[in-house]
Image: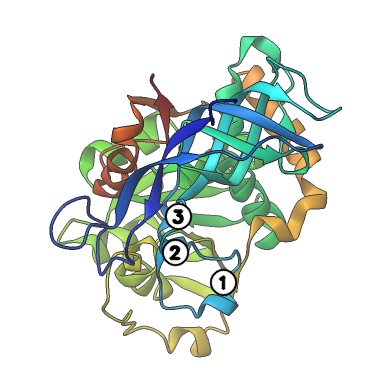
């Protein structure tokens, strides 16, 4: 009799109210040992090596949007938490993949050590030029970088003559938007919004923004006005809340807001209050939410452009590997919300 193959994985124990927690009377996640199914035709067994940490994962486990209106199916209690991953094929019953292949899944893999997965859900990772690591398929050449590229150049239709403002400018997506605007597009003025003087200095010196404004400063409103003397053509927003509110008051007539996220409200039960909402009417501002999967036809060209810019040194690849065993996976993700990291954070799974 064959011994069943098992893995340890984190499942959703309860929808959180506020910030997810691993302790207390109702922890958000539960670590379980589960039996993996036998491989069927068209499936592979993958050992997970890297897990993607993204702010938007919080919406998978509870937000103000009804489940049937979510852009991806949410995670129900009792089911494994999901994220993107890079892993190595251990066994294969697929003609597409052989043992030893390195594969990538963008957002539906479990927080686990191993997974049995359909080959249609996986992508083989081609070697990158210039000695670049394949982990950048989870950052600059993955969902974060591609959302930055598509959102700025295709959704917002940014042009060289524009003044562009980017919230969460030191984060995974925002740091790429800044660089695409400043170093690939060559926009007239690129302004970041970030939390703290250290991050703002990094956004200017490392990413190439013309200016960066600290939203934690008591003079944020005045500083934003000073940094945008000609007002704002495009606002790439990852935050919502008070940052969106103040930026609306700096938008030009017929300007554009590309809404990629609303991280300020992900761990809050309070409604988002906007004093300056009437600016949308008075200035005829267009706001458009978007999701990368709506622009799949743009992805090959975007990857080609971003890889070329990285190889020739126009953009920096900002990725932080955090080593953790399976026990530490949720905490690495939760810690991301403290805002201490710069760029993309991925978990390097240790065994």
Q: Position of residue 90 (x, y in %)?
A: 64, 20
Q: Position of residue 72 (x, y in %)?
A: 60, 64
Q: Residue at x 66, y 40 (%)?
A: 117
Q: Position of residue 94 (x, y in %)?
A: 81, 30
- Horizontal arrangement in the rendering, residue 104 relative to residue 81 (left or right): right
| 338, above or below 4, in the image | below
Q: Quadrant of residue 335?
A: top left
Dot 3 alpha-carbon crowd within 10 angstroms: few under 14, some 14 to 19, many 20 or more: some
Identify the residue position indicated by label 2 in the image.
59
Residue in front for this viewpoint, 109 or 286 = 109
Pointers 1 and 2 in contact (C-beta within 8 Å): yes
Q: Residue at x 30, y 70 (%)?
A: 242
Q: Residue at x 69, y 18 (%)?
A: 128
Identify the residue position indicated by label 1 in the image.
70
- Horizontal arrangement in the rendering, residue 301 relative to residue 203 (left or right): right
Calculate the distance from the C-alpha at mark 3 to the C-alpha at mark 1: 12 Å
Dot 1 alpha-carbon crowd within 10 angstroms: few under 14, some 14 to 19, many 20 or more: few
Dot 2 alpha-carbon crowd within 10 angstroms: few under 14, some 14 to 19, many 20 or more: many
Identify the residue position indicated by label 3 in the image.
57
| 276, above or below 14, in the image | below
Pointers 2 and 3 in contact (C-beta within 8 Å): yes
Q: Position of residue 247 (x, y in %)?
A: 39, 68
Sequence-wise first label, 3 or 1: 3
Residue in front for this viewpoint, 203 or 225 = 203
Badge count: 3
What element does badge 3 sit on? helix
């Amino acid at each position: 009799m064959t011994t069943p193959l098992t893995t340890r994985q984190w499942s959703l124990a309860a929808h959180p109210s506020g910030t997810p927690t691993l302790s207390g009377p109702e922890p958000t996640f539960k670590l379980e040992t589960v039996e993996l199914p036998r491989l069927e035709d068209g499936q592979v067994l993958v050992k997970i090596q890297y897990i993607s940490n993204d702010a938007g994962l919080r919406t998978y486990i509870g937000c103000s949007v009804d489940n049937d209106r979510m852009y991806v199916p949410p995670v129900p209690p009792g089911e494994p938490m999901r994220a993107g991953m890079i892993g190595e094929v251990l066994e294969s019953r697929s003609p597409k993949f052989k043992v030893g292949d390195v594969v990538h899944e963008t957002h539906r893999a479990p927080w686990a050590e191993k997974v049995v997965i359909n080959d249609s859900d996986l992508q083989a990772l081609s070697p990158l030029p210039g000695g670049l690591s394949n982990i950048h398929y989870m950052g600059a050449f993955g969902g974060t970088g591609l959302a930055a590229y598509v959102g700025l150049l295709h959704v917002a239709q940014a042009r060289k003559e524009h003044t562009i403002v980017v919230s969460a400018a030191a984060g995974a997506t925002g740091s790429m938007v800044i660089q695409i605007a400043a170093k690939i597009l060559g926009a007239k003025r690129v302004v970041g919004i970030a939390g703290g003087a250290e991050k703002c200095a990094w956004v200017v010196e490392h990413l190439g923004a013309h200016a960066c404004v600290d939203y934690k400063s008591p003079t944020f409103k005045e500083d934003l006005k000073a940094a945008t003397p000609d007002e704002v053509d495009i606002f790439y927003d990852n935050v919502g809340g008070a940052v969106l509110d103040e930026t609306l008051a700096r938008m030009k007539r017929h300007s554009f807001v590309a809404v990629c996220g609303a991280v300020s409200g992900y761990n809050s039960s309070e409604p988002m209050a906007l004093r300056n909402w009437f600016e949308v009417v008075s200035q005829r501002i267009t706001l458009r939410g978007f999701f990368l999967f709506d622009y799949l036809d743009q992805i090959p060209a975007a990857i080609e452009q971003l890889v070329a810019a990285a190889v020739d040194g126009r953009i920096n690849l900002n990725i932080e590997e955090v080593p953790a065993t399976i026990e530490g996976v949720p905490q690495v993700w939760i810690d991301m919300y403290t805002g201490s990291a710069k760029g993309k954070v991925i978990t390097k799974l240790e065994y």
